[in-house]
Amino acid sequence: MIGRFSRLDTYRELLDIKNIVRVGSGGLLALAGFLMEFGSGVIPLLGKLLILASVAINGFPIIRGAIFGLIEKKINVDELVSLAILASLAMGEFLSAAVISFVMVLGSLIEEATASTARKQIQSLVAMTPKEAIVVKNGKTLRKPVSEIFPEDILLIRAGELIPVDAIITSGIASVDESSITGEPIPIEKTIGDEVYSGTLNQNGVIHIKASRVGKDSTLGKVITLITEAEKHHPESIALIDRYAQWFTPTILFCSVITWFLTGEIQRAITVLIVGCPCALILAAPTAVVAAISRAARRGVLIKGGRFIENVAYADVILFDKTGTLTMGEPIVEEIIPVRGIDKDHVLRQAACVEQNSTHPLAKAVLNAAKKANITLDSAENLFTEIGRGIRGCVAGCQVQVGNILISDNSNTFPKFLKKEHERILAGGATPLLVYQDNVAIGLIAVSDPIRPDAKKTLENLKKSGISKIGILSGDHEQSVKTIAQKVGATDFGFSMQPKDKLDAIQKIQSENNGKKVIFIGDGINDAPALAIADVGIAMGAKGTEVALETADIALMNDDITRLPFLIRLGKRMVFTIKVNIVLGLTFNLIAVLAGGSGYLSPITGAIVHNVGSVLVVFSSAGIAFSSDK
């Protein structure tokens, strides 16, 4: 009954063999009792006993749930069915009591079987975790249960095998299908040093991997936990329905009493009790929420709870961090501008020598460029990083400085043409790195972070989805942010922003936005305050996955921002489906109550009709899980 099964997170406890056998045996006992008592006329007493046994098997759990609900002062609709069963027994209508019990409990199992389609994603993810793995130790291989794999263990993964843990490839090359985690169907080539995730498929090649995260700490483990936990974060619509549902029991009781008073027929009153149970209404929201969360997970969008996707549906403002969100997050060297008499490779070599131990993203771009140009690097000594300026060190007896315009105090050595190039680079949105050798400027290196090729189209699609304001909040310099905003079509932008500045900007919009929701999209690490304060925080999950899953409300597992318009549409469809379900549930209940009170339905047919309404609502919600992405 819905009084016991109203929460989707209890469904997984219902649909097991014990419940099926119990409900089925109760139904068979009622049938056998009917045949004995009313069919052949043989041993009618035994027939009555079998029918009462059927009531005990299927009806007692409902009555017990109602009693516990009253003790805990939590009225639910079990009370209505319990009264119908007890009234039938009191009238001597034992068969009616047995059939009502059987049909109502069977209806709950049917609802579970239908609603469980929304959970197929979790079941399929669990199935993607192999039970065993091949461990390599001291040159020998042995097969061990995945539960006994620990970080730093070396595993052998052959072609066609699922990867059991998050790990780093230590040898070999493979084409890995990551669709189970990212939703991206195209396999990715992986080689030494690349990370692989649990639950992904090695399509070809033989690789050795070193385990980094296992079990629940792995990416797949976190995904499963995330989807499961999402059911506990109910949207406002569920809370609203719950409040209304509390009034249904006394209201239907009143209607039942009035029906009995006006007609004098207790069977009509019993029918009103049965069909008045608001099962369809209570199922309206939770089934839609789980279907939407499951649908999103198949596209590599992980949602922590129903209220977050509901907020997405009502969002009017989307704010992006720039680096790693609208841009690739991987700066590259665009051009090298040397002074006269200096070779480009020399400028790049000197810069790369002092940057080779730096973790700064711009340093990585310089090093990648040097590697691509096959430049051999010398070691640097006396390295010193000046925060906000750059880095300096000694390379082959020369003092080398790399950084912004503040890195050197000797402006006289800065040629005029380099100043013009410096201004041009800034105007183009790139970052200029000045390179000095022995306090003399020898050139400029322009570094830029390429815009994601699908960023502009994504923002256009977001506007079509009903988002009225799209902005950028970035810590980068003004010209760079302005250029990105113009190229992708953002309507507003903020620059040189610290984490607190982003937080303040979001709070200001929220206070001025008349209840509209604000979405912020960042990388889940330095944007943590903004992700937390926004109505919906969305993190780019492929990089820094652990932080993304812990910080944000939603994570894009493959860093694919093209999923955002899909997410907006999904949220709106979920909210629309909930509204349709509510109307459907209320209308169905009203018609059924009127039909029951008018005598058009008996207690038995009323029980059948009641469950039809619940299943219709569940089917309506299940449509979300299988909807088109278009």
Image (tube, helix red, strand yellow):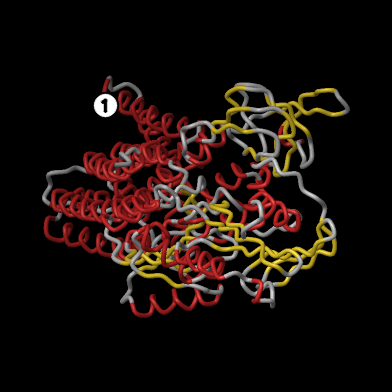
The x, y position of residue 19, in whole percent, is: 48, 35
Q: Disc count in the image?
A: 1
Q: Secondary structure at mark 1?
A: helix
For the point 70% across and 39% down, which residue is it?
Answer: 193
Question: How many residues crowd mark 1 within 10 Å: few (<14), some (14–19), many (20+)?
Answer: few
- Residue drawn 37% across the image and 57% down it: 488
Identify the residue at horizontal 67%, vertical 55% (top origin): 347
User: What quarter of the picture does the C terminus occupy?
Assistant: top left
Query: From the viewer's perspective, is residue 78 above or below residue 472?
Result: above
In the picture provided, is 151 more to the left or to the right than 481? right
83 to the left or right of 194:
left
In this view of the protein, which residue sits in the foreground, 454 or 206?
454
Q: Name the outermost residue toward the right.
A: 138
Residue type indicated by callout 1? Phe
Residue 613, image x, y percentages: 25, 44
Q: Nearer the viewer, residue 412 or 92?
A: 412
Q: Is residue 193 above or below residue 75?
A: above
Horizontal and vertical percent position of residue 48: 36, 33
Name the residue beneath numbered marker 1.
38
274 or 383: which is nearer to us? 383
Q: Is residue 278 in view?
A: no
Question: Which residue is nearer to you in this view: 267 or 494?
Answer: 494
